[in-house]
Amino acid sequence: MLIKCRLSVGKALKVGERWSELLEWPRDRNPQRRGGELEHKLPLAQEIDEMVEKFRNLSVTLYKTPAGRSIGGSPAYLSIRLSTSMPADLLTPPHLEKRLEAGERVLARFQVDLDQRLQFRKGLLVMTNRRLLYLEENQAGSTPFHEWRLADIGELSLEEMGATAALRLSLSGHAGGSHWRFTAGLVKEADTFVARFLEHQQALAGAAPSAEPESNTAPGEDDGLDFADLVPNPTHGNPLLRLLKFSRSWLRLIVLGLFLTIAATSASLLTPWITGRLVDTLLIPLQTKSHEIEWPQLLPYAAMLLGTAFVAWLLKWWRTFIVARIAELVTSRLRRELFEHLQRLSLIYFNKKRTGDLISRIGTDTDRLSLFISVNFIDFVCDMFQFAFTALILFKIHPLLAFAALGPVPLVAWLVKGVRGHLLGGFAASSRAWSLMTSVLSDTIPGVRVVKAFAQEQREIARFKQTDHHVFSTNDRVNRTWSFFSPMIEMFTDLGLLIIWVVGAMTVAHGSLTVGVLWCFVTYTTRFYGRLEAMSRFFAAAQRAAASAHRVFEVLDVEPDMPATAGTRRIGRLSGRIEFRDIKFRHGSRQIIRGINLDIAPGEMIGLVGPSGAGKTTLVNLACRFFDVSEGAIFVDGHDLRDIHVEDFRKNIGLVLQEPYLFFGTIGDNIAYGKPAATREEIIAAAKAARAHEFIMKLADGYDSMVGERGQQLSGGERQRISIARALLIDPAILILDEATSSVDTETEREIQRALDNLVHGRTTIAIAHRLGTLRLANRLVVLEDGRISEIGTHEQLLQTSGTYARLHQAMQEVSQA
Amino acid sequence: MNPPTAHFDLQRNAAGNLTFTDAAGTLHDNVLPLRLFPLTDPQHWVAITSATGQDLACIEDLAALPGPTRELLLEALAQRDFVPLILSIHAILRAAHGYEWHVTTDRGKTHFTVENDESIQPLAGGSIVVMDHRNTRYLIPDPTTLDLKSRQRLERYY
């Protein structure tokens, strides 16, 4: 279920009035009708707080509009999403209220989606101030009902069991209890429910029976706000209509194009009419020898024919050019917007997506749209006019004959309709097959070393062959459907013509029709069916374009989940104090960070150690704000990270990764990546400090040496030193080293180590490292285990406690000695 | 790694926990069976892990186990395993967050949201795995055995 309400500035509303109305349980099952828009004046932080408090167990989600998409010039509107799914009949308040005693209030709800045998069945757990209730959806329509007094409940605990989870209830005093199962996606809601229960239990134990549980929230507790989900924009519709809307900016050009189209079509339609007149007034009399040829009479016809041909050519030329330009303008903007949009999306999105698929959407799909707009669409408009005109002319010339000639049209329309759905599916499949093929390419080509090393060329050839065959077969199947069309329609044309010849011959014999008119009629009918055939082809093209447009808009519809623009506090250079306050992070159903508290002083260097999977990289990703914390908060120089303007913050961060990424370009450009305006002097100074200067000098082109996509001409250590120089150049206040020395040999490590010594000096540094050399400089070492800090202290202190670090250290030494 | 099945000793104790005695005779309480290939080969390769996540034993073929032990193991696996098999697709509707699939599975009727094309992936052997926005996995064991309407609906999105 999704309730979305929109708040914009200016219109006042009584507080609480429509909130409650809007947030009422939905009474119907139709999701479309559950939405609602709400005008409300800002600021309303307090009201939202109240509402969040009231519905906290539903995990209310607030989204701020990304800048640039504001309504009425105001930068802030909020979308409120209640993420839960409720069977309407089960959860309407009256149903629940019947079960409640006098003075009993609902404090929390949680909906489970499985029964104990793991079959899909919805049930609702409700906690009131007295009881825990369970209502189950039953096939017979009745709702089985269970209840437990809160005072009898010993423990309510959550257990994750792979793809599902269980909420276990045990009664105090005597054995017994119950348990509920649900899919792991609901763990977060369950967590909130349990937290609510514990809170209330504590309040009860605290001998304060009159205490309002709502007011008992622990200070600093997160109020359920969450920015971590991807939220596609709910504005959907026919993708082709959206494409039209998208081209609105060029309305004038489009109108001009349409005008030219109509004009060109009309001009070319004149020809048969003139020819018909020519036949009747000149040729037929000439043939029947009733007249001598009169050249002066022929001349105006010839001139008219020449004139219309010339005008038609001129108009068509302009039309084609203008329409092609519109197509290019629209698709160029689509490509640009797609790319800009992609740059705004967070890492979570890119982790989910395949590169090849994204490239094919930006490249191939927009190209198909361009072709569609410039060729198919305009042809279609043109055909529509011709179609209507010709039909009109035919009826004007001879209604009976026209009726006979157009007899097969309904049949064609019926055929088109029948095949349309078939084509759409086919084209969608073909687009996906294409992007699958691109994915295989973008997977295999960068991994070519691995392919060759394992001698798997044949396997990759086979894999490509398979996906290529998939492209072939999907296209082939679609082609089979629509190739059936053209000949079919040709047959109808012949059929129509046959009717005309028969009926026409009879009418000519009766003398009610001249040969010229019949000739003209035949020409128009041929054209008519020609247009019909072209239009049927258009349907195929439109389905293909719709599939492509859908893929393009699908990307554009993903709203930047990371509120990249939500933080508004502008900052300059930070001093570098970082505080992690009780942070938790959940990715999908996996809890990765389970509560970390850590203060890092400005200029301090922290070494992060721990087994892989402990959450080290996640922690630095959170510190860089690639993701947002699920619970708790990170403070930088005393400001909540979420309030700070992300770009401002990232300018303070230097990042050195295990696998340095060098862009295609010169070494100089790569070093200056974070500060394109850097002077040559700065670049050289950074390279010197990073110990990269010597080897760069030895290269034939020095700082102007080109490095490939991944800098393949350089060794791992050299690339790493360039990336260190890159981090050094922006002079960051906070430095993140993510296993910067892990992938190189000891000799190179020593070089990098010297480079790093320069880099960490005077900066707050968080270093993830397995090598002792890197950790030697750290002021404190933090040992992470299973998403928690298990040990903290200096190297010596930790060795003395002989805990995890001491073990890791011993292992590391054994490795380096061996 | 792969002890002879004769030594394979799995019991359920009075507290309802699974216990496992390894080849060396050590008793492990509250062990957890896990399928190693839950999607592509659920009937083979089941690992027994300790409560702390250590690997204790690995069974290649469930069919090779003595009857009662197999029953016990299957029962324990059934407590955790959750990969609904899609039997028929009633509708795939466009929703605010991707597509809403209405299906009948071997675990009853349900509906879920599929966010993007990547959530539908082919597996070796021709089956298709569908991942919903909450990371629950649904399996279509053999798309060719679906009814015609379901197949057509699937085709539009896969």
Image (cartoon, grey):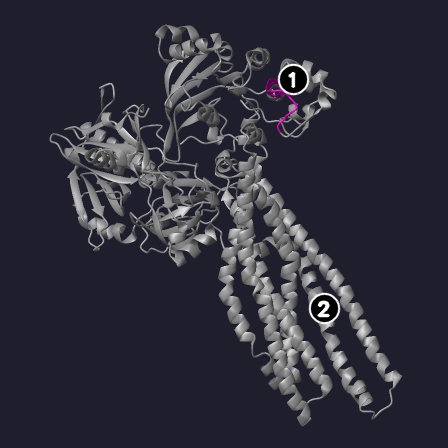
Residue underneath mark 2? A263
Q: Residue at x 81, y 88 (%)?
A: A287
Q: Is residue A789 visible?
A: yes
Q: What is the number of callouts on the image?
A: 2
The correct choice, above or below, for B112 with respect to A45 in the image is below
**Chain letter belonging to callout 2:** A
Q: Residue at x 76, y 68 (%)?
A: A312
Q: Secondary structure at mark 2?
A: helix
Q: On the rendered structure, is A379 left or right of A151?
A: right
Q: Secondary structure at mark 1?
A: helix
Q: On the rendered structure, is A29 left or right of A70?
A: left
Q: On the rendered structure, is A246 left or right of A125?
A: right
Residue underneath mark 1? A686
Quarter location, residue A504: bottom right
Q: On the rendered structure, is A341 left or right of A638?
A: right
Q: Nearest the camera: A589 or A442?
A: A442
The correct choice, above or below, for A789 with respect to A30 in the image is above
The percent position of residue A385, horizontal first and vertical second, equals 64, 70
The percent position of residue A380, horizontal first and vertical second, equals 63, 64
Q: Which residues are magenta?
A: A710-722
The correct choice, above or below, for A553 with respect to A811 in the image is below
